[in-house]
Amino acid sequence: MTHSIPDIFSNNRAWAAQMERQRPGFFTELTRQQKPKYMWIGCSDSRVPANEIMGLDPGEVFVHRNVANVVVHSDLNALSTVQFAVDVIKVEHITVVGHYGCSGVAAALAGQRVGLADNWLRHIQDVRDRHWHLIDAIPEGHRHDALVELNAIEQVVNVCQSTVMVDAWARGQKVSVHGWVYGIHDGLLQNLHITVSGVEALEAAYKAAIEGVSRAARN
Ligand SMILES: [Zn+2]
């Protein structure tokens, strides 16, 4: 699977022609507006492509990706993307999607130094440390998966506590935040059963989701 740059341009032309053949006017339609219902916040990992996984076309999902799908309150990039999605595009669902086999989570779990990104992964080490009693109680082979799930849940909380979401819910906007994980080994999405549609629902949903990780890890 080695593709040269000319291959990529040739693939692109073939793809655009095929789309236009199958759905005449597809690209013209997209120039008028984007009105996706979904926002995806996921890992930059090349094996986790948002559109393909969701079975959605261009125009159907608004995407933000970074190393290990972290949402930090001082990250203007992530917050601006969420703000645009919520205030302007008015997406109805924001999905925070972790994935098993995440190198960022693995490095954070092991405390492995990778360079500048250590500072970014420190946020995941904070998640690890916050839930250390839970992680410590499960077999070593399952800890990575548990931290992937805990990280996705914590990032759902960060999205929900952002000024963007607090303000949107205060004005009655209908938008929900979900926590999911994706398996690069089987191509399947799993629901972490944390779906939040208002600030008041956050705490109970968070507790239940953490309990769910704890229960699954013990079994
Ligand atoms: Zn990853």
Image (cartoon, rainbow, N blue to C red):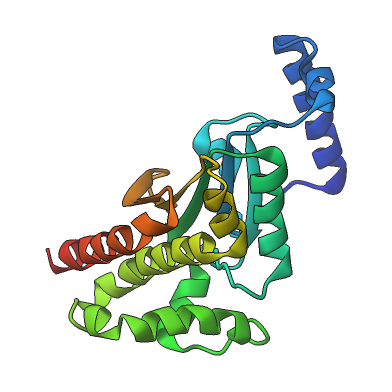
Q: Position of residue 30 (x, y in %)?
A: 78, 25
Percent of width and height locating residue 91: 60, 39
Residue 49 percent across, percent down from the top left: 59, 46
Which residue is most to the front? 171
Q: Is residue 134 left or right of residue 91?
A: left
In the rendered image, is residue 200 in sight? yes
Position of 16 with respect to 38 (left or right) is right
Kindly identify the residue that appears in the image at 67 percent across and 62 percent down.
79
Quadrant location of the C terminus in the rendered image: bottom left
Residue 38 point in image, percent of width and height: 57, 39
State which quadrant residue 8 falls in: top right
Which residue appears at 50% of the width and 49% of the height? Answer: 95
| Image position of 24 with respect to 2: above or below | above
From the viewer's perspective, is residue 78 above or below residue 123?
above
Q: How many marks?
A: 0
Q: Is residue 48 visible?
A: no
| Residue 109 placement, left or right of 60 | left
Q: Identify the residue at the far left of this view.
A: 219
180 to the left or right of 31: left
Which residue is drawn at the image coordinates 22% and 60% (left, top)? Answer: 212
* Front-lying residue, 203 or 75: 203
Residue drawn at point x = 33 percent, y = 66 percent: 145
Quarter occupied by residue 45: bottom right
Q: Is residue 1 above or below residue 161?
A: above
Q: Nearer the viewer, residue 66 or 208?
A: 208
